[in-house]
Image (cartoon, helix red, strand yellow):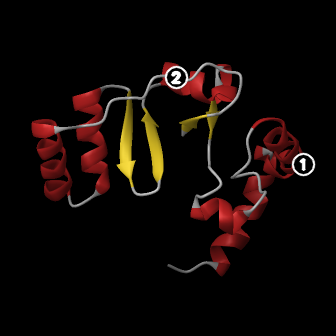
Amino acid sequence: MAPATSSVARLPDPPTPSGQAGLRILRSWRERGSILGALEAMHAELGDVFRLSLPGTRAVMVAGPEIARQVLVSRRESFQWRNATDPVTHLLRRGVLVTDGSEHDQLRAILEPSLQRRLFPAIRPSSWRRWTP
């Protein structure tokens, strides 16, 4: 999640691991055999907001209810969820998963009736029958 380029003031870049912290994070990843070990170590080292250095993106991770609420609700206009060069954006083009702001809200409103909790018990059994791991 990179800050959006709009009239909203640019937010400071979150911390990234370096030096010994980076080595501890890599060790956690190796020991756990999963990226989850690295993410937990990054959270412990860097706090509730940190940046992942990934090729072609500036991914930001948030942990905890207060910061998640800011990102998802009270300050959501400060963030863009996908940029134009993201392969997922290229694949999905203008869908609900890759749009921001009012366009996302409009698409979400179209989907909302089908996402009601009361509909899921009827959908779930038929979906399980078709899917086999």
Depth check: give the residue in front, 44 or 55. 55
Q: Position of residue 47 (x, y in %)?
A: 31, 25
Residue 31 tag number:
none
- Which residue bears the numbered disc 1? 110
Above or below, 85 against 62 in this view is below
Q: Quadrant of the N terminus?
A: top right
Above or below, 50 against 85 in this view is above
The kind of residue tagged 1 is Ile
Q: Residue at x 83, y 36 (%)?
A: 102
Q: Which class describes the residues within 10 Å of circle 1: few (<14), some (14-19), or many (20+)?
A: few
Q: Describe residue 41's horizontal placement relative to residue 48 as left or right.
A: left
Q: Position of residue 80 (x, y in %)?
A: 64, 39
Q: Residue at x 25, y 48 (%)?
A: 37
Secondary structure of the residue carrying numbered label 2: loop
Q: Residue at x 39, y 29 (%)?
A: 14
Q: Describe residue 75's horizontal placement relative to residue 63 as left or right.
A: right
Quadrant hosting residue 33: bottom left
Quadrant hosting residue 87: bottom right
Depth check: give the residue in front, 22 or 39. 22
Q: Which class describes the residues within 10 Å of circle 2: few (<14), some (14-19), or many (20+)?
A: few
Q: If you read the primary sequence from the N terminus, does the residue marked by circle 1 or circle 2 appear first?
A: 2
Residue 11 tag number:
2
